[in-house]
Image (cartoon, coloured by chain):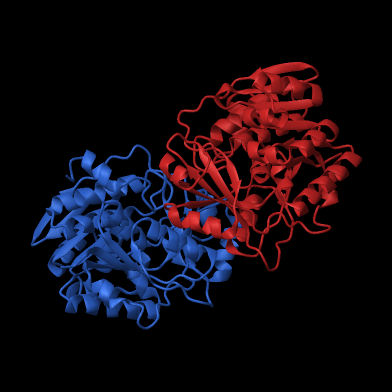
Chain colours: A blue, B red
Amino acid sequence: MPDHDVVAIGNALVDIIGHCDEAFLARHGRSKGSMQLVDAPTIEALYGAMGQGIEISGGSAANTVVGVAAFGGKAGFIGKTATDQFGQVFRHDIRAAGVTFDTPPAGAGEPTGRSLILVTPDGQRTMSTFLGVSPHLGNGEVDAELIRSARILYLEGYLFDRPDAKAAFREAADIAARAGRQVALTLSDPFCVDRHRAEFLELVRKSVDILFANEAEITSLYEAASFEDAAERARADTRLAALTRSEKGSVILSSGKAIEIAAAPVEEVVDTTGAGDLYAAGFLFGVARDMPLETAGKLGSLAAAEIISHLGARPLVPLVELARKQGLLA
Amino acid sequence: MPDHDVVAIGNALVDIIGHCDEAFLARHGRSKGSMQLVDAPTIEALYGAMGQGIEISGGSAANTVVGVAAFGGKAGFIGKTATDQFGQVFRHDIRAAGVTFDTPPAGAGEPTGRSLILVTPDGQRTMSTFLGVSPHLGNGEVDAELIRSARILYLEGYLFDRPDAKAAFREAADIAARAGRQVALTLSDPFCVDRHRAEFLELVRKSVDILFANEAEITSLYEAASFEDAAERARADTRLAALTRSEKGSVILSSGKAIEIAAAPVEEVVDTTGAGDLYAAGFLFGVARDMPLETAGKLGSLAAAEIISHLGARPLVPLVELARKQGLLA
């Protein structure tokens, strides 16, 4: 009997969040709402140009497992940090959230990865990520025992951006499949999908049990003319998929059916960072606990609404309490 | 003609802000609302025990000069960081706020100082500070030219906690006095006053032109039975003093008169960190620009109200715009 609900592998990043206007993005050649990989000199230059920041632990899949823990689930994480201060911050925060995290930090070499997140007045976030040491999961660091201990293995598409991380992704997916566990994948970002379309398509068709994607990602995956076309293709290719559509809510595709889930209400959208990550947290927690898919989707919407109401992609309140107030959890 | 409004010397710290309940403070022997100096093992242990944090540049006098800049003033800072990531964060943020900051980071040795700030549900903050490299201002790092360039030199009482920093404090005060500049001091913390009462009293009587203190600090300084008694003593000892009293507002003492300033309204007190620092920012900006003392006090109240409405001690909005809306600035 698995004793974790969800174990994830992802890039261990610290977010540096600041505000900027649209002109700043244009001046620095950034496409609003996207995630762009940058090298060390580029992130330094961008950091030098931006205003004051605040630092909060992040990383897409890491945010998701923290969200699972905030619902009262048992979650684990595998990811690479360095021994620098940002690494210490990342390790502290994920453990303080109650997530099992035992990947040893790298002793020397590249620093802990970080993501500069620029929030525009409309609450949209634009990310420039310097991966640093995060993709360099070494041999034997993909903890097979931890993966087998979880009902669901959750993988971020971002891992495909570097060979070491991609190898870790494939190794983990094999371990989970052989142990009869479910494998979940998030496509992460439309540009990431563009970079790895053929491999993602093969994964989705052959290895993935639960697929997460937003509108831009799923239409990019299938190079589809519309969301509806893309959803139709995803329905044929997957056993279970959750497609998120920002304020239009989400669509869950399962056994030929489509279940529409409304977005949960938000007073003010402060920062959309982590909306997809936290939707995945609620949905995965629901699926791991064998709840009806509609409930799982509503937990996802609830978590996404909480995260976009404040800066940063880690929940500020115990999500289990929010869910109880809504009657979604006992 | 001075080209800076305010130049400050203080400990360069990065704040790590988390939430806790009163039981956590009791368990770890922390007195709510205070600042306690701790060594490296103690801050590590406390950090390990606390929940998820967010990192924001801080440091009392540094917050004040950032506030002066947010009012549209010209401000400078002198303080010591290390070459680690927190040092980079501190240097970036203070410069991004428009503050002149040229103190070189220390090459090796102790890390950048940090302050663990635990916010209780009532919005009160309790600080445990590991000073790290921050008090080690070397010879010649007290930039005489920068100090002479400012109408007001602002010093934090916390500097008295370490010999190097105390020497820098005295050197800076001498430079300012010889150049005919005003010297402002904040008493910083009641326990800090307790540690250095005799020296603070001598400073206040002989070297300080503008004194900042809250109720606990001024009553501690004079070991007075009441705020009124302490204020009476301060009026006799100082040319200009601003005494803050949280939700009761502040009292400005000048030329035998007492001007009462109401606290500015706040919808919800989220985190009191930096309330005194930002009051000082508004007041110093007003005094540096030769505004009436009542206006200076109102600018202080306004800045304090902004800072306690959110996490962290750096303003989230241009204070000059808030002040214009209130009709306090043209």
Q: Quadrant of residue A225?
A: bottom left
The one nearer the camera, B274 or A231, is B274
The one nearer the camera, A326 or A119, is A326
Q: Position of residue B295 (x, y in %)?
A: 68, 23
Q: Residue at x 69, y 28 (%)?
A: B223
Asked if one can make out residue B330 in the rendered structure from this viewpoint, the answer is: no
Q: Residue furthest top?
A: B257
> Quarter of the image containing the N terminus of chain B?
top right
Q: Residue furthest right?
A: B178
Q: Is residue A267 left or right of residue B19?
A: left
The one nearer the camera, B322 or B183, is B183
Q: Residue at x 63, y 27 (%)?
A: B215
Q: Quadrant of residue B199?
A: top right
> Quarter of the image containing the C terminus of chain B?
top right
Q: Position of residue B168 (x, y in %)?
A: 80, 50
Asked if one can make out residue A4 in the rendered structure from this viewpoint, the answer is: yes
Q: Residue at x 52, y 59 (%)?
A: B44
Q: Position of residue A288 (x, y in %)?
A: 18, 60
Above-or-below relation of B93 to B6: below
